[in-house]
Image: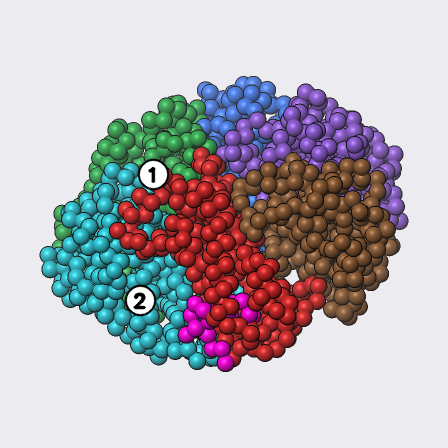
Chain colours: A blue, B green, C cyan, D red, E brown, F purple
Amino acid sequence: MSDSVLISEMTWTDYGKRVEDGKTPVLLPVGALEQHGPHLPMNCDTLIPTAVCERVARETGVLVAPPLEYGYKSQPKSGGGNHFPGTTSLDGETLVLMTRDIIKEFARHGVRQMAVVVGHTENLMFTIEACDLALRELRAQGVHDLRIMHMGYWEFSSEETLRKVFPDGFPSWNLEHAGVMESSVMLHLHPELVQFDKVPLHPPADFPAYDVYPVEPERIPATGALSSGKTATAEKGKYMLDEYVESISAALREEFRL
Amino acid sequence: MSDSVLISEMTWTDYGKRVEDGKTPVLLPVGALEQHGPHLPMNCDTLIPTAVCERVARETGVLVAPPLEYGYKSQPKSGGGNHFPGTTSLDGETLVLMTRDIIKEFARHGVRQMAVVVGHTENLMFTIEACDLALRELRAQGVHDLRIMHMGYWEFSSEETLRKVFPDGFPSWNLEHAGVMESSVMLHLHPELVQFDKVPLHPPADFPAYDVYPVEPERIPATGALSSGKTATAEKGKYMLDEYVESISAALREEFRL
Amino acid sequence: MSDSVLISEMTWTDYGKRVEDGKTPVLLPVGALEQHGPHLPMNCDTLIPTAVCERVARETGVLVAPPLEYGYKSQPKSGGGNHFPGTTSLDGETLVLMTRDIIKEFARHGVRQMAVVVGHTENLMFTIEACDLALRELRAQGVHDLRIMHMGYWEFSSEETLRKVFPDGFPSWNLEHAGVMESSVMLHLHPELVQFDKVPLHPPADFPAYDVYPVEPERIPATGALSSGKTATAEKGKYMLDEYVESISAALREEFRL
Amino acid sequence: MSDSVLISEMTWTDYGKRVEDGKTPVLLPVGALEQHGPHLPMNCDTLIPTAVCERVARETGVLVAPPLEYGYKSQPKSGGGNHFPGTTSLDGETLVLMTRDIIKEFARHGVRQMAVVVGHTENLMFTIEACDLALRELRAQGVHDLRIMHMGYWEFSSEETLRKVFPDGFPSWNLEHAGVMESSVMLHLHPELVQFDKVPLHPPADFPAYDVYPVEPERIPATGALSSGKTATAEKGKYMLDEYVESISAALREEFRL
Amino acid sequence: MSDSVLISEMTWTDYGKRVEDGKTPVLLPVGALEQHGPHLPMNCDTLIPTAVCERVARETGVLVAPPLEYGYKSQPKSGGGNHFPGTTSLDGETLVLMTRDIIKEFARHGVRQMAVVVGHTENLMFTIEACDLALRELRAQGVHDLRIMHMGYWEFSSEETLRKVFPDGFPSWNLEHAGVMESSVMLHLHPELVQFDKVPLHPPADFPAYDVYPVEPERIPATGALSSGKTATAEKGKYMLDEYVESISAALREEFRL
Amino acid sequence: MSDSVLISEMTWTDYGKRVEDGKTPVLLPVGALEQHGPHLPMNCDTLIPTAVCERVARETGVLVAPPLEYGYKSQPKSGGGNHFPGTTSLDGETLVLMTRDIIKEFARHGVRQMAVVVGHTENLMFTIEACDLALRELRAQGVHDLRIMHMGYWEFSSEETLRKVFPDGFPSWNLEHAGVMESSVMLHLHPELVQFDKVPLHPPADFPAYDVYPVEPERIPATGALSSGKTATAEKGKYMLDEYVESISAALREEFRL
């Protein structure tokens, strides 16, 4: 019997035994394929929440579903905009249906506790809509007891951590696109995928209080990063990742009485 | 600069240079999360075409997009049916929109040659529809020169290979669900994920000329496999995989003049 | 009181009496408007399954719904491709919704046994999806006991028949598009619609293991037929049609305990 | 070469020659499967406009597409409501997509003049929406010169005819559901399908200025007819049908310069 | 506590008390933003039914939801066509979903009696479809007792009133677009929004028995009005409005036993 | 000629003249019907952005479209959750289609500059998606020069203002739901709709880093407000509103060169 926490690597018989009583939660990482500056690979928003989920799963005994590797359209102020080559995004409705269908299938298997772990800010409202539609459709099928936690993993950074990692002040999660946090966690997880010599050095992007569509590329830093990750280190990455894993594990334990 | 063939592991700047002249094809593996008997992991239909694509990419210089890891509903006669725990499927429309959106985004990047490499029979008509819709919508945006190859990787088995691997006669691809071919390729690629001691030994499933919905589980082998993979070996797996890689590489070279 | 087996020709009062106890099955033919070579009319895929259904209905006492006369897009390897004038096809989602709505309405009338009888290969996955969606939505309305048989009528040819009708070897159902079977059945059913002097004489189409989209017409026989129907006869047509009627009647009797 | 006016009965080669210059209009009958009282078959709304179209086609040289045999949900005041057994209706969106897809395909063949000939009042707004969507999507594909006539065939009754056929006053087209006009035309076209001994004799239905949903069956005449067809005759039917054919032919000639 | 009849102006606590026992009906005005000739503002179809609803609400103790201010596409024969600047319309599906969602939400609050009060002819079939879909989806959620009245307010004009207001004969509601009734009611309700010196004087529009799409503007009166409102007066407007309020109030009292 | 800035109150002829050269921008307020505590009416999120738009329009000469009065589902951390009676919300897709359709229609009129002015946080991602879809569909129709500004009006508060209005520290816009800002602006705009004696006095809501669905009402303050508006005053409201009007006017002037 496999000891993987990844559902994809399990046989259906092993998996079936794990979920049949409805007490084993399933985590669904929802990422993106999105430019992350000239120094980071385009799968940051998938790799990081998937890594978080795997570690959480090993700590708490939950299972991890295959991640969604394509997300909603990158926005100027939180991802640089959807005009970069490489950024490969879905219409909102597509992401909603995808996430909805998957949640409903896990419920069919008997799962009654799920967590949607988002790695890409722009996904949040669409995965929330997916939770609502899935729960509504499940009720119509007689399933009334599925509970879903929904989160962006970065929301689990404590203020203390932010002070420590950003001694000169934490800009905002939106400006952190391809910045210190993501660069650090990637240096920790996958240094071979980071071209740190190309980390942008420009100041954080400066945006007005509104957006303009179609996106006008000249308003966005040409690197695609919204702030500089130059102070990133693998140590900071480990530190932040550990906190995500610990805090999300604690939250799961509390919500799902693990 | 990364030498990965995986788009997900590249920076946008490296990727952008590769595709800007439209001459580098992109391969999109489209798999499933589906029960594959008591001995194989549930990601066979994703792992195999992704492995094929990576090897083809290294041979021919093309690039590989992140795979779609969820597919259309498993059918009784080709996948055992969608009622097994673990099998996690999408509505047809969801798979169509997902594939359509991704194709359109690669076209936006400048890609003009794509191949959709399906690993799960049930996906085929929906990914075909996605190609049609993507091409139609791209025409409306002024893109008229995208060409898409569409294939199930298993269709590249030569008759000679089938005779060799199935000396007692090749049943059919549909009955091969979790059978000799998939078991062999998985033994070659990921022996650690195969519980070969659990390979089913029952005869191939016997189906009438029609289906009945809702699926009646007692009509399907309880193992989920539609035939026995007991004669599978890693050698057969390597042999078949090599042929897929070689033949698909040849087809890409011819169609896309690589 | 009408003795027609066609629901369309019945009054609602006569029909209502027939279905109120849920024991009378309804057959739904799902065809297409598709080129069938220079010698056959474009409604083959509707006429044949409708004729099968009518005969089955007279044998078994079931009823026949009006056929769907438009189907999913013709594919190169099974119908020559969707680029021919005359071929008039639906988006996948349209065919799904059409079939879904009709199934749900018959269930509302009290029908609890249905058979979807497909006459056009390309429809199959979409009518399967329609069955799944209809059953799911019906469950949400409290209907749990509808059973649907789903079939392509040609799948009821016995191997003996294929040996007899194709003494030189049966190519494949896909290559049979506008070939010996369809030509023969049409000669039997509607000789006045067959221009047999125009039957193509070319060898069967030869396709690679993949498709290319947009379809490149020069890869397809210019006649639109994928093999030659030159050996077709009305006798063969009667023979094959009789077998379809007999075998499908038997299957209905067994499944629905008629 | 077939001299049928029915596209379904033509080969693609014959059809292709007829439409390639864009000057041959195509008529699309859009009907319904709907209860029409205890005396008329449920296909009245399909049979009548299809018969009109065939006769018009023979007079004017245009072509007729296969009819849509399922329509929008029957409404209380114009069809008795959708609760009767036998009435088999589509969601609005389904009818829109169906009609849209078909129009677009005829345009792909080269057709530039179409007429949507509706036989079921409740279809009208949805087939109008279909025309609008089809034209919009065609423009996006570069087709700007398709013109579509849209009509309910009954609107071509002259006031003189109404006076003659309804000497005691014409109630309204809505109350004419399964009334004198439809009964008469069916007696003329298909007397074998009319059970005239069962024609309802009750007075016309009396409705308030509003509808109530869900439909309350006790507000609707139990026969399903909204007025009595007792004064119907085959002669009246021929008279009215002739006028439809003549007037619609004239309109086509004028609009499409035939 | 607010004594407004407008839900939008109430606090949720006040509103909640009003609807919790399911006995207080909610009225939903569904209008349009549509040209109404050179003399009337474009919100006639929203203002009038909203005014009717407010007055009905004050008479009967029901509540009024915020109106939908955008409706279905203006049609040539009932609104002049959708090609005028200012006319701002929705796709049919959009209007259906909008109305459906709102009905379902009121049902969630506990409301069990609703009236959809349409101010724009072209909306009618789509708001009917919305009622049907909302009721169907509510049943799937276990709500079986919602009743919805559906109406066009103008249908409540008595024949006596029409004789009085149109002494030279009532043309038809369709030709009344921007004609005597709407001009009169607007003169009564909002004289400051009427530029009566610009009221068109041309005769009623004359249409054939069919429509042509795309709309050909030269077939429509250039003013956008389909008949002349020159005989409109504020007195007639008050008279007609009073009748709408009185008759709809009576209908609500009867249907909902207020 | 009307001097209203509201498109709904203009005749089509007056409106047409204003927009035909494409230089007059149109503002679209997008609100919600949502509980706002026991002291504020449920239309705050519509009234405030509409008031902002009207004032901006009078300052800058732009026009204002009728507001959307229903928005996306209220979320626990920014609106208290969608379970309150009175909160009346749309599915995400509905809001997307509604906004998309309206933008496309204004572009059809000739408008080339628009601003979507959101009054309800939960709408933002869906109105962004609507902008993207509208622009994409317009490109397919040959319109390439529409520019859309997209904003939440509250984002135009300067830090100075926040310091002044929230002397004890600004919590966050999310916690401001029915708090000091909205209460103040409503006291300024519509004191008659505010029941200030019922303003909640409880401390701001305290939320974990994640959400749980279905929403568990006991996690939300029972008042529906997420913080106390007790320090609200009409003066603060005027001060904040003036800043919104001034700053948005300045932004419009700069972006659209007014």
Q: Number of callouts in the render?
A: 2
Question: Which secondary structure type mostly characterizes the magenta part of the structure?
Answer: helix
Query: Which corner quadrant holds the C terminus of chain D?
Result: top left
Q: Position of residue A6 (x, y in %)?
A: 42, 49
The stretch drawn in magenta includes residue C192: no
Q: Which residue is mark 1?
A: C214
- Local packing at callout 1 (Cα closer than 10 Å; few below 14, some 14-19, many 20+) is some
Q: Earlier in the sequence, mark 2 or mark 1?
A: 2
Q: Which residue is mark 2?
A: C51
Q: Secondary structure at mark 1?
A: loop
Q: Position of residue D105 (x, y in %)?
A: 40, 46
The type of residue carrying mark 1 is Pro
Q: Mark 2 and 1 residues: CB-CB less than 8 Å, in contact?
A: no
Task: Decide which of E256, B81 is in the foreground and name it.
Answer: E256
Task: Decide which of A94, B205 is in the foreground and name it.
Answer: A94
User: Which contiguous range is marked in magenta?
Assistant: D179-197
F242 sits to left or right of F115: right
Q: Residue at x 47, y 57 (%)?
A: D245
